[in-house]
Amino acid sequence: MLIRPSYVLSGAAMNVVSNAFEMEAFLRAATEVSAEYPVVVSEFMQEAKEIELDAVADKGEIVSYAISEHVEFAGVHSGDATMYYPPQKVYVRTIRRLKTIAEKIAKRYEISGPFNIQFLEKAGEIRVIECNIRASRSYPFVSKVSGNNLIKKATQVLLGKKVSRDESERVYDLPFVGVKAPQFSFTRLPGADPVLRVDMVSTGEVGCLGDTAEEALLKAMLSVGYKIPQKSVLISGGPIKSKVALLSAVELLVKKGYTIYATQGTHRFFAENGIPSSLLFWPDDYQEPNVLTYLKEKKIDLVINIPKNLSKGELDNDYKIRRTAIDFGIPLLTNARLAKAFIQAFCRLEMKDLKIKSWNEYKAM
């Protein structure tokens, strides 16, 4: 279930709960944030794709729009999500349905100006998370990448100027890809758990362009401080679904010659699937080789630690791994889909493959 207090910004005190104990604890926290107003409790759809539509409407008619796709499944705040524009893995029929839904919402509320709709899509079923009648965080990103200035058009509408409907929207046919990646400041927040949830924790973002999705993603990840691992990767894969999701990416790492370290359950899973890995004991096992020792001695270049569930009730071992990685300056990923995309990008591309071109050069393509 998703617990959401009313009248909060950036998902404050919003949480996903998976049992009765967490439900009680987070309901109490939500009422402390917003005691006067009701708390919204709704179903949380796991493994659902999140898609955003940014648009400009004039008296209920959409005059311009752009659709972008999150790399991570829903459950990561949109301000913390890594985003593709144009979308890379969204069916054409889904795009059409999103546009139809957006047109109905714009007409029903007679929207004039900017608005953003966040959608969930799973197995062909589409749901609206929310519609915000304002410019979103992705508004400047999609405007810059597409060359279609939604902000200028929204301003003209709000000033009462006539904006003609743009029939040449480029949803799919851009010859390049843009990726927006979040920037975090966990190193300046001692003790904070560096894991992505439904509440926003990022402090900035970077937008990068590439001829392919992998090139754009790798540029963006490098720009916000990630480094391509040189020798070794630690993987603590979390739930079985995320272990399975990472399998093909880990096979790429092995082929590239990386040493794979893994915690107990992940090590066993890899062994069952023919992937060699070296076992590191949990922090509270107090046995060597211990994961904390390897992190502190900088024997690991990248940490992938997937939470056991989406709430804050994390096991102490996972928290210690994540926090130690941050404190010792080791790149950390806590989302399986983003980890897989990053691994595929740096295994298939080398630094020499990353083309340094100006925005004008991409725009001229």
Image (tube, grey):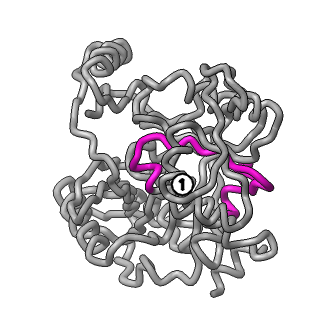
Going 44% across and 26% down the picture, which residue do you hit? Answer: 312
Query: Which of 234 and 76 lies nearest the eye of the viewer?
Result: 234
Q: Position of residue 70 (x, y in %)?
A: 45, 57
Image: 57 above or below 95: above
User: Of the residues shown, which amino acid type is indicated by label 1?
Assistant: Leu
Going by the image, does 350 lie left or right of 216?
right
The location of residue 96, given as percent across then percent down, is 27, 74
Name the residue nearer the viewer: 152 or 198: 198
- Judging by the rendered image, the residue that carries numbered circle 1 is 338
The quadrant of the picture occupied by the C terminus is bottom right
Report the residue that reaches farthest toward the bottom: 365
Residue stretch rendered in magenta on the structure: 218-244
Taking the spot 28% from the left edge, 48% from the top edge, the residue there is 129
Give percent across and percent down for residue 89.
Answer: 41, 70
Whether 18 is drawn above or below 278: the answer is: above
Q: Count numbered badges in the picture.
A: 1
Q: Residue at x 59, y 78 (%)?
A: 176
Please tell me in which quadrant of the rendered image residue 203 appears: top right
Whether residue 357 is visible here, answered yes or no, is no
Image point 39% across, 72% down: which residue?
163
Which quarter of the picture shows residue 76? top left
Residue 319 visible from this viewpoint: yes
